[in-house]
Image: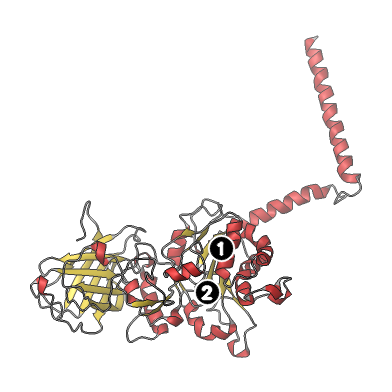
Amino acid sequence: MQQSFSNLSLVMLCKSVAISGLVLFFFYTFLPGFPSKDASNLFGQFELNWSASSIRSSSPVNSPTNISHIMFVLVGSLRTWKHRKPYIEAWWRPNQTRGNIFLDFPPSPELLPWPSSSPPFIVNEDVAKLRVFQKLRSPIQVRLFRSILEAFRLKQNKDVRWYVMVDDDSLVFVDNLVEVLSKYDHTEYHYIGTNSECIKSNFDFSFDMGFGGAGYALSYPLVEALAPTIDQCIERYPYLMVSDYLCSSCLADLGVHLTQEKGFHQIDLHGDISGLLSSHPQSPLLTLHHFDTIHPLFPSKNRYESITKLMEAAKIDQSRLLQQTICYRKASNWSFSVSWGYSAYIYENIIPRSILRKPHETFVPWQRSRPPFYMFNTRWPWPPKDPCEAPHVFFLDSIEKLARNIVLTTYNRTSPRNLPPCSLSGNHSADAITQIRVLFEAILPKEAGKIECCDIEYVAGMKVAEIKLRGCRKGEVIA
């Protein structure tokens, strides 16, 4: 009897489900105003959404970030492209890097055919068509900012995890950029960049802004959320005069704030920036900007030759590029400071790392103002008149790979110091040295944020000093 009741209940349940299904089918198929009378569209919409998702995320979400996951949004103008093109082509990798250079006008005949060594160009949309155009304080900057929206609309986003915005007069160190972005969860909202080096520039705009010349990275979900709101945000802030401030304001209204990475460099400086590059923070070098406003990076070379020279080292080992290593030759009371791939200094005095890590103030600020000028500590004046503080300066001459994974870089003296020996060190002059050779075993990349140590081999009176990089021993004091 109980079993019969159970069977009866099961039959009634099945009938109820069947009747409910027919009612729902009738409702969705014949009800007026429903978007589609084709029942197959119920499944078609699902298939469309699933297909779009699978196209964008065909690779595993937790797979390591690589160069193909980055979409570069490069911004420039037709007027400046001709002389800034070498900056981009120095780091751009055809068929590997992804992205476009956004221009204000179509290329002139002299620039065509467009070279494959450059990023594909896109002509920006006319901002004069915006409703708020008459109120815009700086239409040019709005054009630059909207490049993010226009890049997103291209729908070239298969497997894209990051959009990286950067100016056309910047160098990008792609391998390091991939390594740094790999630290972050690309499925979350991230806005990664840096401030200006100058306090006044940050004060004039924002201390919470990623400066666009240095470049900044936006995670894909953040761009996906930002893009539909960009024109509305421009209407909210028509008075803002720079694209990066506009971007940071729009992101702040989405509840997203800047994450700082020290490897981005706005270079809001003038003159000789060798002091800054020779005492780079222990962070991977990501970008360098404003090449048109600074001296060439290497003596006796022009700007383009200097970039080519720096990229020679970048192609061998970006993880060590500009990373400062300090060691001592106590027998002669000398301190050696090596900025790998760029420069080497010898001081005729034992100077602790806590001092040597501060850059010599070889440069001047972007704008004159009351001190303090910079967001970091410096050593000044430059050049020092005290022979115990003034370095012997050497710059990169060559780089080569030797047997057994050994990499050799040589740094040559470019000019005499023209000072007497440091009397504190017992008159052990380093004037005789004309070249410094630096070797290391290239088995693994340098770990970001972790310093390396070194040993010095030198015979008194010889013209060449040799330095071997190595890992620091436990508790080793660099002083």
Residue lying furthest front in this view? 370
What residue is shown with label 2?
167
Q: Residue at x 85, y 27 (%)?
A: 15
Mark 1 lies on a secondary structure that is helix
Let me know if residue 404 appears in the view. Answer: no
Circle 2: element type = strand
Please indicate whether residue 442 sits to the left or right of residue 235 in the image. left
Q: Position of residue 302 (x, y in %)?
A: 39, 86
Q: Nearer the viewer, residue 401 or 345?
A: 345
Closer to us: 162 or 76 = 76
Left or right of 111 on screen, residue 23: right
- Left of 136 or right of it: where is 344? left
| Residue receiving disc 1 | 248
The image shows residue 465 at horizontal and vertical percentages of 18, 74
Where's the N terminus, which quadrant? top right
Amino acid at dot 1 = Ser
Q: Amino acid at mark 2?
A: Asp
Q: Residues within 10 Å of mark 1 (few under 14, many from 20)?
A: many
